[in-house]
Image (cartoon, rainbow, N blue to C red):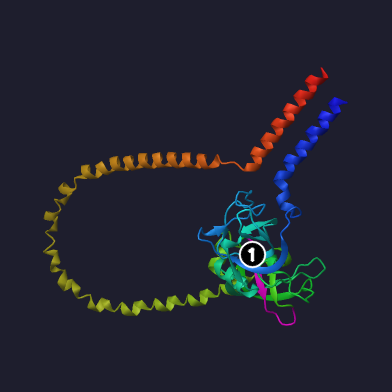
Amino acid sequence: MKRRLGTVLAILLCIIVTAVSVYADDGKSQNPDYATDYYMIVQSAQGGADIYDEADPKGIKLNDGQIPNGTAIHVLGEKDGTDGKKWAYTQYHGMNGYIPMDDLDPASRADAVNEEYRTFGGKDVDFEVKIQGNGGNVPVYNGPGEKFDEVSGADGIADGTSVHISQYMRGEDGTNWGKTDTDGVTQGWLNLDRDTDYVNENVSADAPEATGTSGNVPVAAVTPTPEATPTPKATSTPEVTPTEKVTPTPEATPTEEATPTPEATPTEEATPTPEETETPASTEDKESDDKQSQKTSGKNVKADSGMKNPVIWISGIGIIVIIILLIYFLKKKK
């Protein structure tokens, strides 16, 4: 009986420890003081903001890197933090959590869309894509992201419809978005990766930003830049080649007489290459310096990698407690 009780306690402790690391993602245990529905833009002196599992600056950070300035935040609720300040409840990359409002600036939804468009390199484009909705309609959003919500009163765009894309943006999470302006269909933003036949034909991640388009036929559409290649007309420089007439410079060629430059050739003697050979020594010093800097930088990387998430510490403590309980009950049984 005691053995069974010990087993049950051990299982319960495991569940508790595991829950610590996942409860922040389900959004069920994070109760804001009240619900809201408005937008703010990340604008922090630190260059970005962090999202925490609770409205507590000592809480667990859910993001790996800071949310960059210019990112739109859909505020779903507010809560008074343990620091006595207001915190915004939101969802970021599928994780529910809190962001300090000191790192956010208020904005209308339209302003939030424009700010993200500017921050993440949005641009005007000119290409078409075909809707792929697996037999159904695909949703259209108010901005380049699901956080901007679907266009109200719209049923989306039917599967197989060809639509024109006039604006393009790659979101902060790497998703490609396009704004349609085709007559007769819902105007708004489409998830090009999920809901269309858009294909990124560029290998480089920032190539789309350089070309403005990077999908189906778009590159062909924008690449008419070859028309700008009539630069060969500029090659008419051969007309300028009549300089050949001016070539009477050969008269000036009597400079050959001045060619006694060979006397100056003793510069070869001045080519104290030994001095140049000294440079390899200096280069070796530089290489050694570089190796030392690499070693030191490696140490820094190792030092940084040593930082652990508090969740791991909590899990470790939980495991130790479980082991102690098991040993206790085993001894008691004997």
Vertical relation: 283 (above or below) 55: above
The residue under the point 77% across, 40% down is 15
Magenta-drawn stretch contains 179:
yes
State the image quarter where residue 287 is shown.
top left
The residue under label 1 is which amino acid type? Ile
Q: Which quarter of the rendered picture does the N terminus lie within?
A: top right
Report which residue position mark 1 lands on. Answer: 73
Q: Nearer the viewer, residue 111 or 174?
A: 111
Vertical relation: 296 (above or below) 82: above
Q: Which quarter of the rendered picture does the C terminus lie within?
A: top right
Judge whether residue 216 can be spotted in this image. no
Q: Where is residue 210 drawn, in percent x and y?
A: 53, 67
The residue under the point 52% across, 59% down is 47
Give the left or right position of residue 151, taking residue 67 as reference: right
Q: Secondary structure at mark 1?
A: strand
The residue under the point 76% across, 37% down is 14
Q: Where is residue 273 drawn, in percent x and y?
A: 22, 44
Give the left or right position of residue 127, taking residue 279 as reference: right
What span is colored magenta in the figure?
173-185
Q: Residues within 10 Å of mark 1 (few under 14, many from 20)?
A: many
Judge whether residue 237 can be spotted in this image. yes
Secondary structure mainly formed by the magenta segment: loop
Q: Where is residue 74 drawn, in percent x and y?
A: 67, 65
Give the left or right position of residue 135, taking residue 243 as reference: right
Magenta-drawn stretch contains 243:
no
The residue under the point 76% across, 54% down is 28
